[in-house]
Amino acid sequence: MSEAPDSKPDISVLLRPASHQSGEGAGRRMGGGEGMDRQLARTFWTRSRLFQFVGGALVIALIAYALWSTTGGRKLNVDRERLTISTVSFEPFQERISITGNVLPRTTVYLDAVEGGRIEEIYVQEGAMVEDDEPILRLSNSTLQLSLLNTESQRLEQISQLEQTRFQIEEGNLTRRQQLTDMDYNVLRLRRDLERNQELFEKHVISEREFQTVKDEYEYWERRRDLTQQSFRQDSLRQALQVQRMVIAVDRMDANFQVMQEQLENLTVRAPLAGQLTALNAELGEMKGAGFRFGQVDVLDGFKVRAGIDEYYINRVIRGQRATTQPIAGIEYAMETTRVYPEVREGRFEVDLTFVGETPPDIRRGQTIRLGLEMSDLGEAITVARGGFYQSTGGNWVYVVDPSGDFAVKRPVRLGRQNPLVYEVLEGLEAGEQVVTSSYETFGDVDRLVLR
């Protein structure tokens, strides 16, 4: 039997769970009918809740950063007695660099072999005092000696040829003079005959033929004499030139012979001046080539210091720059640069310095001297003491002690010039502040040192 149209549905059926419904009504929702929407599950992470969560996290991070900033980040407890704490000062400052040099004699002359050869004799031993031009050792060189003999033989032969040529020239000149004398005599005799025959011919005493014969003979001898005189003058010029060339050749041979003699004399190595023979590298029987350095002679009239400097300063070191030694027997001595060597080896160049005024007593060759080389004029600057901190920070930051003295905080700084005692402070520190200047190697990367 069908339900009347105006009858109402049972509300308990609509409220019954879907799992208990069956048939056609089981697929229907409350509100009846197939056109009603299904109920969706609610999401916990809504957009508003997500924004609230992110904002809260940011606030927590800011609070944590503020707490970290106020408490100094990573901390390390250190014993105050193990630290070196220095006060930043505003004081007179002069840039200086520390250098180390060795004492050398002011004048040193090296003994080099001018000619090679075999060591035959050694006259003086190392360490002895020598006088100027005193023989030190003697070499032998058979090739050089043979060359000297050949040169002398050629020289004597050239001299002999010159003397023979001169003799031949003198002999030829004598013969020509005799010929000219005979020609002059014939010309004079024929001139007289011609004058006498001229008178006789005019008086018709002799014939024209006789007159003409005398005249022709006179003119012949006169022309012959003139030609002989011209030839004699030309031969004299040629012979003089020949003799001059031979003289030049002989002079050249003499010069060569002199050079060869000097080379033989150079086989004996002599002291170039008076001093001490501080090195001698020679043994009997050794063969040494030309240019070999046997040793050196030091003139004991003063000392200098040769020091090596980092190439970074090569454009700032000049002749006449002043320096001061570290105390030697309690006294500091003034020095100045006298020579700057431009050659750079292994990142360093060398300078020579001499003492200004008094020289330290009892210094010896090879002694090591430490000194400070002035790199600027005296002025005023904020300074901090040198220390081991620079090796760890490169001068980019330091630990600054808080006024309370309980801790030290990491602070960026900028350092400039330096001298053996202090660094110049360009930025980051003020006079009166205290800085930890001892080594930072054991601190790691902490931001705060708690001083106990």
Image: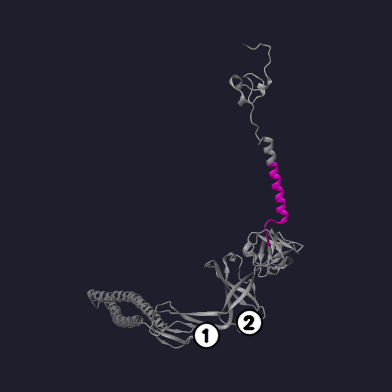
Q: What stretch is highlighted in magenta?
A: 54-76
**Percent position (x, y) of residue 288?**
40, 79
- Which label sits in the foreground, 2 or 1? 2
Regarding residue 443, the answer to whether it shows in the image is yes
**Which residue is identified by label 2?**
360
Q: On residue 207, which mark appears?
A: none
- Residue under circle 1? 276
Q: Which quadrant holds residue 230?
A: bottom left
Q: Which of 71 and 289 is in front in this view?
A: 71
Question: 204 left or right of 130?
Answer: left
Tags 2 and 1 touching, CB below 8 Å:
no
Q: Nearer the viewer, residue 357 or 312?
A: 312
Q: Could you say which is closer to the camera, residue 370 or residue 88? A: 88
Q: Does the magenta stretch include residue 308?
A: no
- Front-most of 69 and 169? 69
Local SS, label 2: loop
